[in-house]
Image (cartoon, rainbow, N blue to C red):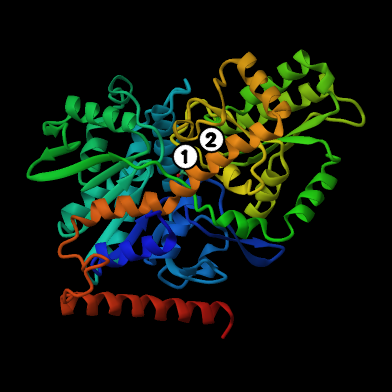
Amino acid sequence: MGWSKERLEEVARTRLGGAKLIVVANREPYIHHYKNGEVEWIRPAGGLTTALDPVMRACGGVWVAHGSGDADVQAADASGRVGVPPDDPSYVLRRVWLGKDDEEGYYYGFANSMLWPLCHQVFARPVFDPNHWDKYKKVNETFARAVLEEAADGPALVFVQDYHFALVPRLLKAARPDLVVAQFWHIPWPSAEKFLVCPWAKELLDGMLGNDLIGFHTQGDCNNFLECVDRAVECRIDRERFAVQRGGHDTAVKPFPISVDPALADEYLGDDWAARAAAVRKRHRLGDRALLVGVDRVDYTKGIPERLRGVDRLLHKHPELKGQFHFVQIGAPSRTHIPAYRDLTEEVNGLAEQINWTHGDDGWQPVVFLNEHHGPEDIFALYRTAAGCVVSSLHDGMNLVAKEFVTARGDDRGVLVLSKFTGAARELRDAVLINPFDVEETADGLYTALTMPAPEQERRMRRMRAQVDDHNIFRWAGTLLSEVGKRVPDPLPAPGAEDEEPEPGRSEQAMAERIATANYLTAMHLASAGL
Ligand code: F6P
C-alpha cells in the first residue's frame, strides 16, 4: 500500500497511542511580519519547513520554534501560541523568544558558523568559539523548557529537528524519562576524522544519545555517526540492529530519506499558473525563450557560483545558444548576518554581471538573479514553464528543490540537472547528474537540458515522478513515527485490529487531547478574524 496523508493520520492515531506530537525546530513554518503597517504571513524558504508542515497538518500537535518575524509577538497569544496555517489552522505553533545575543551565539554562531560547515564538505572552515557554545547550551535549555511545558499534561512524542538542538534530547530525557524522543538530522554527518576535531564533540554526541531514535537521510550518514560514537563515547554498538547501547538506554540510528508532498504542486500551480509564469516572464523581459532555473537559499553549499561558471562555459562552447535562453536564479536571502553569506551574495551578483557583460547585449541578458523571497505559487509556475531546473549543491543532505521540480511537471516535460553530491541523486537516477566542481561537466549538463528530445524528457520525468509519488513525505514521517512509535507504551490497536477492545483510559485521553487542541485552534481562529 502506498503512503498518503490519510495513512499517516492513521499511523499517528494508532502508533502514538494518545501521546501528543511535539515537533521542535528552530525555523517556524509561518512567519508574521509587518508590510506597510499591516501584519502579513509568509512561508520561509528551506527544506525543513517545506517537508514538515504537511506532516503536522496531517497529524496535529505542537511545533515549537524560534519566533523570528517582526510581527510574530503581535500574532501570537501571551504564551507565544498561534494556530497555523494562519488561513486554516490545524496545529499549534508555539513561539520561543530569543534575545539578539542568544540568536547571535546559538544560531549564527554555533549552529551556522560551526556545525553547518563542519557537517558539509565544502571546504569552509568552521568557527570554534566558546562563547557560541555557551549560547548554544543556553538556547537548547530554553527550548527544552518550552517543550516540557507543552508536554506537561501527559505522554508525548517529541520530534526534534536538526543540528540546532543536539543537546535537547538529553535534557528532555533527564527531566522526563517517560517522553519518547526522536531526532532527524537534516544535514549530512561527516566522517569521524572531521567531526571529532570539534572541541565539544563528546557533549554533542552525549546530547543526541538521549534520543530513542536518530534519523539521517542516508546509510552513509548513519555509518559516519556510529563511527564517531564508537571512537568518542563509552558504549556498545549493535551493528546488526544499528543501535547504540549505553547506561541501559538504546538509541536506534537509521536512514529515512526526506521528501515532499506531491499533491502540493497542484495546489500551488492552481488553474492560473500560466498567467503567473507569463507575468514573471514579462517583469524580467524573458520573452518566450527557454528557461533554466535555480531555486535556492543563497548558501555556499548550494554551488551557485559553480552553476554560473557553467553558464559562462556553455556560452563559450555553444555561441549559437546566445539569445536563445535565460538562466533564472531565485536566491532567497539567507543568514545574511554571517559574513560568508554576504560575501557569497556579492560574488553571485558580480558573476552575473560579468557573464551578462561578456555574452549579453541590449536585448538579451543570459543571467537573471532574483535575490529576494518568492512564494511557492511563483516558484512552482517557474518550475512548470522551465526547460530545466539546475541543482548544483557541493554537498547536500537531500535537496528538496529537485523533488519539488519533479512534482511540478505533471506534463512529464523538463530536465533536472542534479549534483551527484546530493542525497536526492541516489533516488532521482533519471536526472542529468553532474559534478558541480567540474565546469565542463556542468556546462555539458546545461547543454543536455536545453537540447534533450521531448520523448527522452518524458521517459525520464515519468520515472522520477513515480519515484517521488511513492517515496513522499508521508512515507518519511510514517515510517519514522512507526519506528519510534514502538517505544510509546501501549499504542492503540493497529488498523485492521478494530475488534480488539481499546484500553478505555487511553482513547479517552487521546480524544480529550484532540478536543482541547481543536478548541484552542477554533478560539485562535475566531480571535484572529476579530470575532
Ligand atoms: O536542512 C538544513 C536547514 O538548516 C534546515 O533547517 C532548513 O530547511 C534550511 O537549512 C534553512 O535554514 P535556516 O532555517 O537557517 O534559514
Q: CA distance from mark 2 to mark 1?
A: 7 Å
Asked if the residues shown at circle 2 and circle 1 are in contact, with their CB atoms under 8 angstroms apart, the answer is yes
Q: Which residue is mark 2?
A: 338
Q: Residues within 10 Å of mark 2 (few under 14, many from 20)?
A: some
Of mark 2 and mark 1, the one earlier in the sequence is 1
Q: Judge by depth and name the residue closer to the eye, 153 or 217.
A: 217
Helix, strand or loop at label 1? It is: helix
- The label shown at residue 108 is 1
Which amino acid type is marked by label 1? Tyr
Q: Judge by depth and name the residue closer to the eye, 2 or 257.
A: 2
Q: Quadrant of residue 177?
A: bottom left
Q: Position of residue 214 (x, y in %)?
A: 27, 43
Q: Quadrant of residue 35?
A: bottom right
Q: Judge by depth and name the residue closer to the eye, 23 or 16.
A: 16
Task: Indicate left or right for 21 with 279 as reference.
Answer: left
Residue name at image x 57 percent, y 63 percent: 71
Q: Position of residue 391 (x, y in %)?
A: 58, 32
